[in-house]
Amino acid sequence: MNQSFDTPSSTPAYYLAIDLGATSGRSILASFDGKKVEMEELTRFRYPMLHICDHLFWNLPSIYQYVLEAIKAAAEKLSAINATLTTIGIDSWGCDVAYFYADGSLAGLPYCYRDKHTEGAIERFSAKMSKEAVYGKTGIQFMDFNTLFQLDTLRSNKAGVIDAADKILFIPDALAYMLTGKAVTEYTVASTSQMLNPATGDLDPDILAALEIPRSKFGPMVQPGETIGTLSSHVQEFAGTGSVPVVAVAGHDTASAVIAVPSPDKEYAYLSCGTWSLLGIESPTPIISDKSLRYNFTNEGGIDGSTRFLKNICGLWLLERCREEFTDAPENIAELAAIYRQSECESIINPDDPVFAHPASMTEAISDFCAKTGQTVPKTAADYVRVIYRSLAKRYKEVFDWLQELSPVELKRLHVIGGGSLNQYLMQYAADELGIPVVAGPTECTAMGNVLVQLRASGALKSLEEMRAVAINSTETKTYKPQ
């Protein structure tokens, strides 16, 4: 039965979610009728990584322009029905940061986390602070693209941007700053940096000291649901809006997605399945131990002080890159997913092997891995698709078993959210490997979580329990049972 909630007004309220993934973004216009959220995609846009002088960057000004166009599109659509925006929220990928001068101008383009300049950074920083000390303070999985290692690499390379910058802001915070002129550091996206101490709820002073970066270069810490500021007069003029508040949602896209997992209890693990696969649980407190360090699990921030205890796994990045090279395969993603049935290739790769992080050719990287491990080398597109699906499912099983060891509760099912949940073949492989039901959907969890935080910020919802109930009311799922 759908649960209803008291809404502050009988007049429909509208919310704009800007959802930025690792390769593309979109804007979602949402409304709430007291029972469920209705969402409509307004705009969709791509922003490929810029390859400049052997480095990878994000074209942040271009992304900002897409955001402006999305706000304008929302304002025009609502003006036609004599309605206005209530709030705006932005979520994005984690780790990457932008640098701003004191006058508010952008100090160059932000590095992309896939750039190779941080290779070896973990070992280099370990000379300043041991891995055990860093993990004890942050509880974050060691990955060389974490913000900590990006900043330390710039220090080691004697790049001047850190000292020249007045502000260092994570991507959703940078865009909010460009919209409002207000600089903040949102908790969930900051937690991906490996610089935030969950015990204090702020950036760790010892880590900042090791980087020789003052805390003042980062904005004040805010939690999901706090208002950052209102659209600047320039933005209002361009987009045709009033002084619409920009709300700090769960700025890290996975944090937003987890908010909207449609589960009535805690006896589940979640898998955010897209370019990356993030497998974890929602915990009331961080889980920091010798075993969690050995398994390289991470404790990222969630809503209301919760912890997203998870492990990052390479995801459909493998298929996305192979797809660019296929000449004998369907372009339609659903048809491409189905061709695995044309293959009997039994080879298995480790999706998290560094050779798959940024190869010149993904098909060659997979073929080389199979050859070096004495397995059958895939030859057709169907072979590669089958190898990727089976390898991901087996990696999910391995990480799930580690997660169950560390979890305080028995995990009875896996909720899969994100675009990968539409892949029925991968979902069935996962159910078969894990031996538990896999509940697939919704695909729009990130945008839904973004909107749910805005709803609570505006007073339409009052608690996380109400937010989860709305998520259940608003979404459809499909369950895959082990075969």
Image (cartoon, helix red, strand yellow):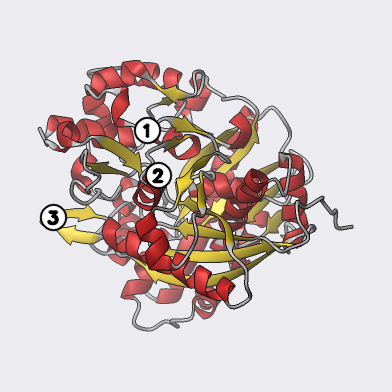
Give SS at disc 3: loop
Q: Residues within 10 Å of mark 1 (few under 14, many from 20)?
A: some
Q: Position of residue 142 (x, y in %)?
A: 38, 32
Between 381 and 18, the residue placed more toward the observer is 18
Give SS at disc 2: helix
Q: Quadrant of residue 448?
A: bottom right
Numbered marks: total: 3
Q: Which mark is residue 173?
A: 2
Q: Amino acid at mark 3?
A: Asp
Q: Position of residue 394 (x, y in %)?
A: 54, 51
Callout 2 touching callout 1 (CB < 8 Å) = yes
The residue located at (13%, 55%) in the rendering is 54
Q: Which callout, 2 or 1, points at the residue further toward the start of the chain?
A: 2
Q: Is residue 8 above or below residue 137?
A: below
Q: Is residue 122 above or below residue 376?
A: above
Q: Position of residue 66 (x, y in %)?
A: 37, 66
Q: Is residue 468 above or below residue 316?
A: above
Mark 3 vs mark 1: give the one in front.
1
Residue highlighted by disc 3? 54
Q: Quadrant of residue 438?
A: bottom right
The residue located at (34%, 37%) in the rendering is 146
- Quadrant of the frame with the N terminus: bottom right
Q: Amino acid at mark 1?
A: Gly
Q: Amino acid at mark 2?
A: Asp
Q: Residues within 10 Å of mark 3 (few under 14, many from 20)?
A: few
Residue highlighted by disc 1? 219
Q: Is 58 placed left or right of 432 in the picture?
A: left
- Quadrant of the frame with the C terminus: bottom right
Mark 3 vs mark 2: give the one in front.
2
Q: Position of residue 315 (x, y in %)?
A: 46, 55
Q: Tell me if residue 346 can be seen.
A: no
Between 104 and 476, the residue placed more toward the observer is 104
